Amino acid sequence: MWPGMALSIEIEEVLFSHKSKYQQIDIFQTKTSGKMLALDGIIQLTEADEFAYHEMLVHTPMFAHPNPQNILVIGGGDGGVLREAARHDAVKKIDFCEIDEEVIKAAKKYLPFTACGFDDPRVKIHIADGNEFLTQHQAVYDVIIVDSTDPIGPGITLFEKPFYKNLKKGLRTNGLIATQGESIFLHKECIMNLVRMTRELFPVQEYANILVPTYPGGHIGICLGSLGPEIKEPSRQIPKKILEQLKYYTPEVHKASFVLPGFAEKMLGSG
Ligand code: SPM
């Protein structure tokens, strides 16, 4: 995924190591970044900076939507996205679809800081393939959030057009999607493809950038599509109760995350 580059994080202890039906799952105690989850050797989160990714992937689409009630989360068995989505009082139901039950089990045991939303009464867990799940759930959701791994291994179909078509079909009027959007420096082809697919399907499409030091390149993006609401600004006041709980997302950061460096703006300008 990033030829010629490596990211090293000093490990103090291996807490969990297991090969599931789908992937190698490892949880480490790091020296300076707290606990860390890796899937197939790729860092998914560290305790030190997971808030940046999870807050932005969730609150950007959730605050762009005027009244998000029915939510679907695909992937993200660590529970970080669920934790953030559950902060919204408007939410009535969260379907959580994860292919690998073993990730959920390991997160509940070793990553309680992300795996804290599974018992919320609004959450229904589905152990299933996200794409197949969507074929049976059409016109249901206000916001769909895809917290995928990279486009290798079990997550590969989540970067393909049939999946994006199904995401659109899963939405109600005025619905939005937000998907893991890789790195503007490291994955140009992949991002251009994501943006092109989203633009072909959605009247509104945007790409946001987030600072996350423990992802390669120190950043990661979100690809967003909307059937109606504008995305680049929150559509409503952010409740004080939520703002006080957050460490990265603010209404100003929401807007600023869409201001991309010149080369990326040019790259994505025409899709
Ligand atoms: N809930 C955490 C799961 C994280 N999902 C995204 C992981 C992406 C890992 N690769 C990042 C590469 C960025 N250039």
Image (cartoon, grey):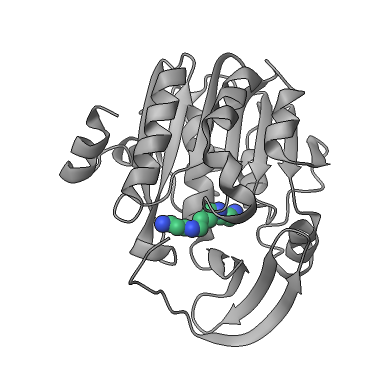
Residue 101 at x, y percent in the picture: 80, 54
Q: Which quadrant of the structure image shows residue 190?
A: top left
Q: Residue at x 55, y 54 (%)?
A: 152
Residue 93 at x, y percent in the picture: 75, 29
**Lateral position of residue 138 relative to residue 11, left or right:** right
Q: Which quadrant of the structure image shows residue 211?
A: bottom left
Q: Quadrant of the N terminus?
A: bottom left
**Nearest the camera: 206 or 128?**
128
Q: Residue at x 41, y 59 (%)?
A: 212
**Lateral position of residue 163 relative to residue 86, left or right:** left
**Nearest the camera: 86 or 241?**
86
Residue 16 at x, y percent in the picture: 73, 77
Tally the numbered discs.
0
Is 177 situated above or below 171?
Answer: below
Residue 238 at x, y percent in the picture: 48, 32
Q: Quadrant of the C terminus?
A: top left
Q: Residue at x 39, y 19 (%)?
A: 204
Is 143 situated above or below 154?
Answer: above
**Nearest the camera: 110 or 168?**
168
Is 200 situated above or below 63?
Answer: above
**Nearest the camera: 159 or 249?**
159
